[in-house]
């Protein structure tokens, strides 16, 4: 069995397609359930974020797994399979492991280095564990991926040069609304992304901050954390008349903020063409795109943020002391150096993980060889004891030790050598040769019982 990853992301599909494929938590559970019934999958983890939907699986057969996963994605998302196939990518075995590590480090994120992916990947793994769908293979892979992600942030300059989606949205907003110190900012939602937006805006010097959320308790908690005021979601329309900037990310199905609602609220307050900027971080979108047709209203969504992340941006317009640091583009030299350092780390970690898997694959063969030797030694010593019944106990004990030493020395070099070779690309060939030469069955009960403590993935 082998690891396969099938998915769609901002690299393979436009924002409009990602919006159609977006999966709220309850639909993720439906997808996991559908995949659990697939014949060609033994383990499944689903990673669903605003910019990607990926299925990590342990496959019985490659082509069968691809069919099962694609069919399940088509059924759950409602997108016809022929159309879905245009946007899907497939990673298998070594490439799947490398992709998992790139995702965990943020190298594959729209905002390169965005640390939020670590939490999202951890949540996906826990969800699969809770459903009993993450077994030994995916647990080992994704736990290792999480460790690689932590190393990337701790041991490289990635954190100092990376830009989150929230920071990119704020950087895109500042030239349009001016200094945050005098701006009125509204945060819609209280989930992870909205919480990050509220905290980022508060740290950037905004003193007129409000939070609106469907669940009052969570909204009030976020407001208290950031020094904001909480407003009920029912009063959202009125807030559009006075707000300068609105960050929204609720995970609602359908548009939470419609053009008619915004038009009526602004007309009632006599806002005219007063500037109002929406930064919509939700997928699917919270804000009806036609809001941008209203006088003074502008909407920045994921498409615009993707472009902003490819362009040098700076937070230089924040009216506070000390001056805000720059938000470097990924094309800047320091950012390129940091990304290269993370890429190098991923390369090393992939090689180490693969070597560990190969060593784990060799371990049963080594155990079977030693078990075979033990059986032969035991049988021969019993025969020898019967023939030399007149020998003293001390002499027989010395003969036993001598025979064991001889066998141990004969086995030492080949077993050590095959373990050393386990890290090589064709390690399976050496294990296969041992099995053929000594007629070994590494999955025989007697052999398996001796594999306790065999090395796992590094």
Image: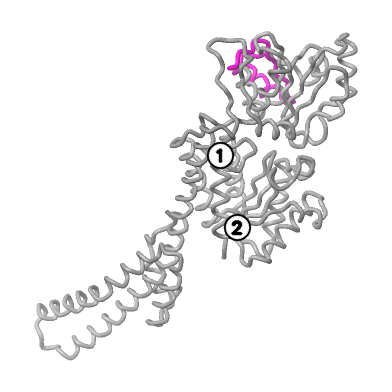
Q: Position of residue 93 (x, y in %)?
A: 56, 60
Question: Is residue 226 shown in magenta?
Answer: yes
- Left or right, 405 with respect to 274, comes to left
The answer to whether mark 2 and mark 1 are in CB contact below 8 A is no
Q: Residue at (38%, 82%) from the top-left corner?
A: 437
In the structure shown, which secondary structural element does the residue marked by tag 2 occupy? strand
Q: Nearer the viewer, mark 2 or mark 1?
A: 1
User: Residue 280: where, in percent of width, then height?
Assistant: 74, 28
Q: Residue at x 44, y 56 (%)?
A: 457
Badge 2: few (under 14), some or many (20 or more) residues near its Cα, within 10 Å? many
Residue nearer the viewer, 163 or 28: 163
Which residue is the extreme one toward the front? 333
State whether residue 329 is above or below residue 451.
Answer: above
Disc on the earlier residue, 2 or 1: 2
- In the image shown, does 410 or 323 lie closer to the viewer? 323
Q: Nearer the viewer, residue 305 or 249?
A: 305
Quadrant housing residue 265: top right
Residue 429: mark: none
Task: Assign the N terminus to one quadrant of the image.
Answer: bottom right
- Disc 2 versus disc 1: distance between alpha carbons? 20 Å
Q: Which residue is mark 2?
A: 43
Name the spot of residue 56 as percent of width and height, x first. 62, 53
Q: Which residue is mark 1?
A: 118
Identified at 9% across, 77% down, the residue is 394
Placement of 148 over or under 333, stated as above or below: below
> Residue 96: percent from the left, percent from the top?
58, 55
Q: Which residues are magenta?
A: 203-228
Helix, strand or loop at label 1? It is helix
Magenta stretch: residue 218 in it?
yes
Neighbor class of circle 1 (other Cα within 10 Å; few <14, some 14-19, many 20+) is many
The colour scheme applied to this rendered structure is: one colour
In the image, taking residue 282 as reference, residue 358 lies left or right, namely: left
């Amino acid at each position: 069995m082998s690891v396969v990853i099938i998915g769609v992301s901002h690299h393979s599909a436009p924002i409009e397609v990602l919006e159609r494929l977006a999966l709220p938590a309850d639909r993720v559970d439906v997808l996991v359930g559908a995949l659990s019934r697939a014949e060609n999958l033994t383990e499944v983890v689903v990673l669903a974020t605003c910019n990607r939907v990926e299925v990590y699986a342990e496959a019985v057969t490659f082509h069968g797994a691809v069919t099962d996963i694609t069919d399940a994605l088509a059924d759950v998302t409602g997108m016809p399979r022929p159309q879905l196939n245009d946007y899907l990518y497939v990673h298998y075995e070594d490439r799947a492991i490398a992709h998992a590590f790139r995702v965990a480090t943020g190298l594959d994120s729209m905002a390169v280095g965005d640390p939020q992916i670590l939490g999202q990947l951890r949540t996906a793994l826990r969800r699969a564990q809770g459903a009993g769908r993450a077994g030994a293979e995916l647990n080992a892979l994704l736990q290792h991926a999480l460790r690689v992600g932590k190393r990337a942030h701790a041991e490289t300059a990635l954190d100092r040069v990376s830009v989150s989606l929230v920071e990119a949205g704020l950087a895109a907003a500042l030239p349009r609304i001016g200094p945050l110190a005098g701006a009125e900012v509204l945060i819609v939602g209280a989930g992870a992304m909205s919480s990050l937006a509220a905290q980022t805006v508060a740290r950037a010097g905004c003193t007129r901050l409000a939070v609106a959320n469907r669940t009052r308790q969570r909204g009030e908690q976020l407001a208290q954390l950031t020094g904001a005021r909480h407003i009920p979601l029912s009063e959202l329309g009125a807030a559009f008349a006075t707000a300068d900037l609105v960050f929204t990310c609720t995970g609602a199905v359908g548009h939470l903020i419609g053009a008619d609602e915004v038009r009526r609220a602004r007309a009632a307050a006599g806002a005219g063409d007063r500037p109002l900027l929406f930064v919509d971080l939700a997928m699917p979108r919270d804000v009806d795109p036609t809001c941008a047709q209203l006088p003074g209203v502008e909407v920045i969504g994921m498409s615009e943020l993707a472009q902003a992340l490819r362009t040098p941006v700076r937070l230089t317009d924040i009216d506070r002391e000390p001056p805000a640091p720059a938000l470097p583009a990924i094309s800047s030299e320091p950012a390129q150096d940091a990304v290269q350092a993370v890429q190098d780390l991923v390369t090393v970690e992939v090689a180490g993980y693969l070597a560990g898997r190969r060593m784990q694959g060799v371990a049963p063969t080594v155990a079977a060889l030693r078990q075979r030797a033990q059986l032969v030694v035991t049988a021969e010593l019993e025969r020898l004891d019967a023939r030399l019944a007149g020998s003293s106990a001390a002499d027989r004990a010395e003969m036993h030790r001598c025979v064991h030493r001889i066998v141990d020395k004969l086995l030492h070099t080949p077993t050590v050598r095959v373990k050393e070779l386990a890290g090589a690309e064709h390690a399976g060939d050496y294990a296969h040769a041992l099995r053929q030469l000594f007629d070994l069955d590494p999955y025989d009960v007697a052999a398996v019982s001796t594999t306790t403590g065999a090395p796992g993935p590094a």
